Image (spheres, helix red, strand yellow):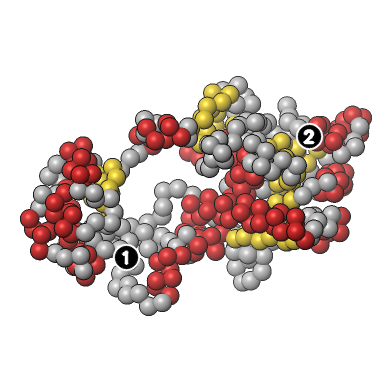
Amino acid sequence: MNLLDGVKILSFNHYLAGPLAAQTLADLGADVIAVEPIEGAFQRNWAVANHFVAGDSVNHLATGRNKRSIAVDLKHPDGIAAVKKLVATSDVVMENFRPGTMTKLGLGYESLKAINPGLIYAVATGFGSEGPYKDRPGQDLLLQAMSGLAMRTGRADGEPTAVGAVIVDQHAASLYAMSILAALFARTRTGKGQLVEVNLYQAALDLQVEPLTAWLNGAPSPTPRGPAGIAAWFSPGPYGIHATADGHLAISMAAPKALAAGLDCEELQRFGEADSFSKREEITRIVAARLKQKSTADWLPLLEAARIWHAPVQDYRDLEADPQLRHLGVFKCAESAGGAQIRMVAHPARYDGRTPEVRLVPQRLGAQTREVLGEIGYGAADIDAMIAGKAVGVAR
């Protein structure tokens, strides 16, 4: 995939949102150079479920493909000098340190813009680079709590509920990559670089743009979460996930008459379409009770015939056998840098019918330090001296 062929990106990212955004751009063909501390970035040393594969954390396996790795001590003058030489030939710098960190290192926007006026300098923070929260730790669960997302998730008779994936970070990663692409496009017209900023707090709000806009404009919300098992406070009945005799089904948009036919339930015949919201709790209780009387497999063809929007509730083990995911080739297999078989989730878009390939599996820390420094004019002896002085590191 060469959509971003010729675009050079320096990624000073750690945790999830930054590395994932950089991986998205790398999938599209950008030359992404991950600039990490000599001891490795956070995502190399901490793994989801504390799981490592042949020495690689699964965080790194999830966010590190198609990037070259260079290990640099950003407190060493020779390391800083090397980074500034890289900046001179780069299109984008990405960083998601605490606000002010890169400036203290001499690598802030104003300093690097003086080296390369056309540079896109892209920053991701927890709460923004200015304001009363700028120094707070920006972590997904904390943002779910602060943004209203947890308060608005779950049952009305239950507790606020965190989403079971790191969705704020992942949405921020998409916004981060999108913003960089917009700035690169603008530069093709103006020739000018610019500062791009995204933050997790606004990403968490952006995930809720529909219900939050409803609330801001006076939509009634007597409870923060949906009553009677309805999935959201703003939804009609029976929108939600309901138990069957042996599992669970999601019922989406469905008129009461269609539900009456699909569920063979005379009790629902008395409701009209206008009742879907005004009598949503009553409708939902009837639907939930009826669904418990048959298995999920028994209900599926009946709901399909009635053209009711529905889906079985699947777990990860079900995804491997899902025929649509198999058709799309969503799960990719490769051999890791450590020699182990690994599986990855593919880039989520196609271009002329093709999914971007895995050009580089997630690399060992410093695997391309010599290569990258050589490209900007360092000789072998210079690089050896920098390694010996611990200005840079190479893969063991």
Q: Residue 369 carries which label?
A: 2
Q: Position of residue 204 (x, y in %)?
A: 50, 60
Residue at figure coordinates x 30%, y 58% from the top left:
231
Answer yes or no: is residue 41 visible: no
At mark 1, the secondary structure is loop
Q: Number of numbered discs present?
A: 2
Which three-letter amino acid code belongs to the residue tagged 2?
A: Thr
Q: Where is residue 390 in the image (x, y as percent from the top left)?
A: 82, 37
Q: Residues within 10 Å of mark 1 (few under 14, many from 20)?
A: many
Which three-letter amino acid code belongs to the residue tagged 1?
A: Trp
Q: Name the residue under label 1.
A: 233
Residue 336 in which image quadrant: top right
Q: Position of residue 78 (x, y in %)?
A: 87, 44
Residue 191 in which image quadrant: bottom right
Q: Position of residue 166 (x, y in %)?
A: 49, 49
> Height in image: 66 above or below 11?
above
Q: Residue 63 carries which label?
A: none
Name the residue nearer the viewer: 36 or 376.
Answer: 376
Q: Quadrant of the C terminus?
A: top right
Q: How far apart are marks 1 and 2 (CA)?
A: 52 Å
